[in-house]
Amino acid sequence: MADSSPLLPLEPENSVVDELQPSLDTVVERLIEDFGWTQLVQSTLVLLSRFFDAQQTFISVYTDSEPSWHCINDNKCNSSAKICDLSKSSWTWNGSTYKTIISDWDLECASPFIKGLPASSFFVGCLLGGFVLATLADTSFGRKNLLLLSCLTMNLASLMTIFSSNVWIYSAFRFLSGFGRASIGASALVLATEKVGSIWRGQMGTIAGISFALGLLSLPGIAYINRNSSWRTIYVWTSIPSILYCVLVHIVVLESPRWLFLQGCKEEAMATLKRLDPTRLNLCSPYISQKNEARKANLYSSIKILLERKWALQRLLIVMLTGFGIGIVYYSMPLGVGNLGFDIYLSVVFNALAEIPSYIIFSIIISKWGRKGSLLAFTTLTGICSCIMCIMNWKVLIGLELVSYFSACIAFIMLTIYTLELFPTCVRNTASSMVRQALVFGAVFSPILISAGRSNKVLSYGVFGLLILCCSVFVFCLPETRGVTLCDTMDEQEEKDQLAS
């Protein structure tokens, strides 16, 4: 649990205006500082979207992999030879011919570009979707509606994938799925954290991380159960439950009261707060009687605001650069388990199991360590372990990979929480989405580096380590935010930073 005493400068004793008209953050904090059952259900349900997010992000580990094969004509076949050097009649796939897209569409001899096209298309879709959808949650669309739109787009595209007849149509559906997936992480975390008090923000990050890890952990089980079935079956198993989840979100989930206030929707905000904690609403309702003007914002006004303020632009560039370095490692490690020489099912299980305790440890250190120091420590550990993997043999490779991924997981969620605290409400979702785009941008290069690393580990793990070490060094320029209450406007953030400096 985080320290409940914010490390902020004391207000002047004669600030009568501030006492009569407290800030929006102060008012909302008074209403939601106690973490009740309603908030627990709301936050958990919102962050469950990360479960389905993980499934679609790493589903290609099984659907796009190259199955094992065996010889059927020993006179014309040598099991140690390359499959493309053998006659098609001399060998056959182990199990079903439709197990993966490689065996289904005879892509075993296709170029690495064709084999990696679906996975790359997914992450390219994430990039484009992030830039298109990033500001919707901060403008008139809202947090809940964007989360619902993103999840529904990702899941419907995933379900439509089963009708693909070739790798090009398949890649197009994967692109569309990635486009929808782009804003899920940022929207879910922002929506969850804006319904709880400041001391619970770290716990929201923990729930989000565990939800993602459980989604990753579910994939080996689904793939193993359907190991003798078509790859299309895996998409059915993952997409239908997530579509039903979208229906539940539409019915049950509440919009962020902070966002509603900023939009001038005072009655809706009060109704939301009443449902979150009806016992405390009457205590603070007099403070909310002051006029709250709606923000008249166009679609990309929040990006414009970020670019106009020098301090905001500097922070955004630093966290995005750090996110790029973390993303390279975070996405590459699970996607590259096929290069470790271990069972493909157990390798993903080990990575998922490493992710779960990483978020439990995060929930402990978030209340005791500073954001900046923690982020630097874990990115450094990740980088060092990745570099050492270049010179180690397979016997210790899996251990170093798990340590590196474990550290990258903590760095990932630490960066997301840090970003939430660095920016005010009016641009928070946009900034978070931009950082997530930087994380995904690192994933776009992962298939290329993983492919190159099959012959030379320096080209994969060495590059991973050096990139995360170089990108994270600029974190030294950011302010510490541990225990600081959230701001709502850019001017309020500037005033608070000036008082703290």
Image: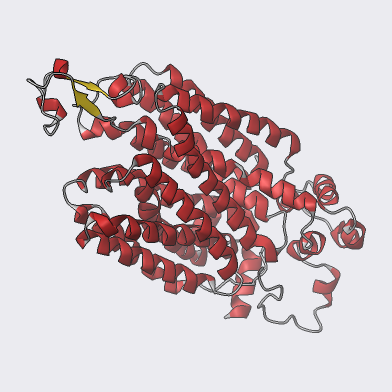
Taking the spot 40% from the left edge, 35% from the top edge, the residue there is 122
341 versus 82 height, above or below = below
Q: For this rendering, which residue is in front, 187 or 226?
A: 226
How many marks are shown on the rendered structure?
A: 0
Residue 178 seen from this side: yes
Give the camera-side residue of 86 and 433.
86
x, y percent for residue 423 = 58, 61
Q: Is residue 103 above or below residue 130?
A: above
- Residue 11's image quarter? bottom right
Q: Residue furthest bottom?
A: 13
* Quadrant position of the N terminus in the picture: bottom right
Residue depicted at 72% across the width and 62% down the height: 197
Looking at the image, what colour scheme do you see?
secondary structure
Horizontal side, residue 459 vs residue 22: left or right? left
From what the image shows, is residue 458 above or below residue 499?
above
Extreme residue toward the left, this view: 75
* Image location of residue 399, percent across then percent down: 34, 59
In the image, taking residue 394 as reference, residue 184 lies left or right, namely right
Q: Quadrant of the C terminus?
A: bottom right
Residue positioned most to the front: 74
Residue 127: x and y, percent?
Answer: 42, 42
Q: Nearer the viewer, residue 416 or 16?
A: 416
Question: In the displayed structure, does residue 341 sit left or right of residue 311?
Answer: left
Q: Is residue 132 visible?
A: no
Whole-percent x, y for residue 205 in the image: 59, 57
Q: Horizontal placement of 290 versus 305: left or right? A: right
Q: Which residue is drawn at 20% across and 56% down?
A: 458
Q: Please tell me in which quadrant of the rendered image residue 169 appears.
A: top left
